[in-house]
């Protein structure tokens, strides 16, 4: 009897996991446009569905992001000005707040996701904008740090978005990108382009790569990669 119960529990949790996995795939399906992806996210955010599916047990990106930032910024966290890019429902903002960061803005193009983020009261300014090749309504050298977790993927932030991050981050400031490792080679936009662009920005004296760490179980059982760059 106990064995049957255990078996049905495992089957149930596998079903829940695979439902969550396919919900996540829906936002990253091959060929999805940036517009389609944000419409999908806005619907997914309704009634807390996004956070039910991508609970922090299944998706650890925000925890990795906040941990890396906390290790980097040991002092003056309260006044460290951060932009959470592709902020979604505000997971990263919450994680940063619990680590003492108090000056965090959010940038997120999906209105439904941003609405959930607003309710958490962890962000000062909220921008409903895409990060792409267009100029954001943000002055040069505004932030001590720009961070994104989960913002990179099929139909998500394009390579050109990196130039805007460099522009709005202060000299000496940090850019931290947390993403699924396999997207570097599986996403057409990034394959043979994203890391070469990162190198080009270094060669051009725009930033210096501080670290590139592969982390386990970033989302579901997939590895993540955490890039840290210091603006020159
Ligand atoms: C997997 S969610 C991650 C959300 C949040 N950072 C988190 O960790 O829960 C990806 C987010 O990227 C946003 N996004 C997609 N394309 C974007 C773009 N070009 N610029 C900024 N955000 C984008 C989506 O709207 C979505 O909220």
Image (tube, grey):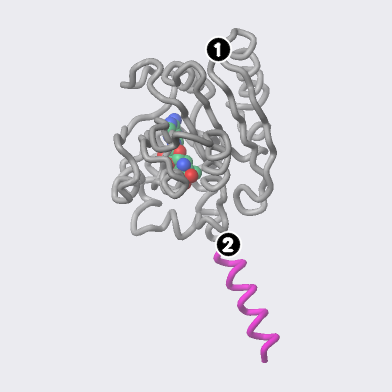
Which residue does the image show at 58% across and 73% down from the upper left? Answer: 12
Look at the image and tell me whether residue 37 can be seen. Answer: no
User: In this picture, is 22 found above or below 102?
Assistant: below
Residue segment shown in magenta: 1-16
Sequence-earlier tag: 1 or 2: 2
Helix or strand or loop: what does disc 2 sit on?
helix
For the C terminus, the quadrant is top right
* Residue located beneath label 2 in the image: 17
Residue 8 in the image: x percent, y percent?
Answer: 62, 79
Residue 36 in the image: x percent, y percent?
Answer: 41, 38
> Of all residues shown, which one is farthest toward the bottom?
1
* Residue located beneath label 1 in the image: 206
Helix or strand or loop: what does disc 1 sit on?
loop
Residue 154 in the image: x percent, y percent?
Answer: 54, 35
User: In this picture, is 136 found above or below 37?
Assistant: above
Which residue does the image show at 34% across and 45% down from the upper left? Answer: 122
Instruction: Work out whether residue 50 or residue 63 is closer to the camera in this orientation and state it.
Output: 63
**In the image, 147: left or right of 222?**
left
Q: How many marks?
A: 2
Disc number lying in front (1 or 2): 1
**In the image, 79: left or right of 156?**
left
**Rounded to the nearest whole Å, what is the CA distance between mark 1 and mark 2?**
41 Å
Which residue does the image show at 52% across and 42% down from the upper left? Answer: 66
Residue 187 in the image: x percent, y percent?
Answer: 61, 32
Which residue does the image show at 34% across and 30% down from the upper left? Answer: 129
Q: Residues within 10 Å of mark 1 (few under 14, many from 20)?
A: some
């Amino acid at each position: 009897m106990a064995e049957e119960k255990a078996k049905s529990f495992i089957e149930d949790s596998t079903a829940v996991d695979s439902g969550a996995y396919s919900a996540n795939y829906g936002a990253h399906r091959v060929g999805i446009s940036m517009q389609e992806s944000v419409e999908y996210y806005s619907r997914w955010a309704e009634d807390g569905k996004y956070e039910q599916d991508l609970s922090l047990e299944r998706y650890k990106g925000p925890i990795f992001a906040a941990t890396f930032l906390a290790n980097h910024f040991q002092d003056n966290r309260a006044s460290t000005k951060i932009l959470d890019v592709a902020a979604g429902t505000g997971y990263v903002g919450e994680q940063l707040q619990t680590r003492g960061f108090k000056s965090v803005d959010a940038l997120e193009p999906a209105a439904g996701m941003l609405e959930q983020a607003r309710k958490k009261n962890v962000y000062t300014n909220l921008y409903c904008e895409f990060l792409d090749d267009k100029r954001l309504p943000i002055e040069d050298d505004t932030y001590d740090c720009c961070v994104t977790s989960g913002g990179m993927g099929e139909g998500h932030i394009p390579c050109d978005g990196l130039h805007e991050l460099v522009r709005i981050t202060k000299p000496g400031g940090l850019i931290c990108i947390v993403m699924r490792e396999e997207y570097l080679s599986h996403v057409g936009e990034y394959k043979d382009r994203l890391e070469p662009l990162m190198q080009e920005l270094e060669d051009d004296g725009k930033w210096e790569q501080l670290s590139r760490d592969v982390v386990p179980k970033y989302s579901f059982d997939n590895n993540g990669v955490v890039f840290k760059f210091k603006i020159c």
